[in-house]
Amino acid sequence: MRRLLLLVAVAALGYLAWPYWCAYSLAKGAETGDRAALERYVDWPALRTSAKEEVGGALMAAQGALGGLGVGPSAADLGSALVGQAVDAALTPQAVSEMIARSKSGGSAGGAGRTAGPGGIIPAKFSRENVKWAFFESPTSFVVDLAPRADREEIVKLRFRLDGFVWKLSDVDLPQNFSL
């Protein structure tokens, strides 16, 4: 009976620690541009869908803030299609690895050591100081709240889903004040 309880306790601790390990492995893979880690710990189709919704929402908000720009539904559909194509091209393991390599060499992605991405919302180097919260939302969903820098209040939510025996990044929620 004691062995069974010990086995259950070890299994529960392993289950609780596993998403933290996967998130850490993804962060280390992202820092180094490790394409294999990016492929293993990211659900690319789900992440592209999430990014299209986030960027499309920011585009619509920007259009609304400018008084609608006087465009009709067909122009809005064209904008959505262009956003979709841009996201599909940018969010692949190869493209992300290349972007990380360029940023490390001082290329166009913000320079070495700086935050990357629109508005500097993605930390160039991940550390415990960037993580504001990390815990389960459900038995198969895990969320990590990241702040790009300690002096900023924007929070990027990374959502991981259990896919077989691996926790994979499947959704990114950008800050409410995100703009293009």
Image (cartoon, grey):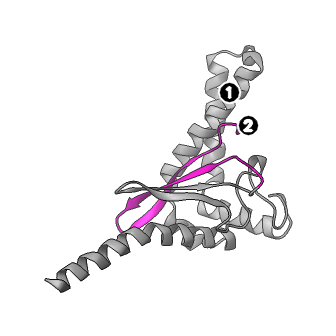
The residue most toward the bottom is 3
- On the rendered image, what quadrant is the N terminus found in? bottom left
Q: Which residue is mark 1?
A: 61
Location of residue 174 in the rendering, given as x and y in whole percent from the top left corner:
63, 44
- 174 left or right, relative to 116: left
Q: Which residue is mark 2?
A: 179
- Give the number of marks: 2
Q: Is residue 51 above or below residue 103?
A: above
Q: Nearer the viewer, residue 60 or 8?
A: 8
Q: Amino acid at mark 2?
A: Ser
Badge 2 marks a residue whose secondary structure is loop
Badge 1 marks a residue whose secondary structure is helix
Mark before the other along the chain sequence, 1 or 2: 1
Q: Are marks 1 and 2 in contact (CB under 8 Å)?
A: yes
| Label 1 Cα neighbours within 10 Å, binned few <14 / some 14-19 / many ≥20 | some
Q: Residue at x 39, y 68 (%)?
A: 16
Q: Is residue 168 above or below residue 63?
A: below
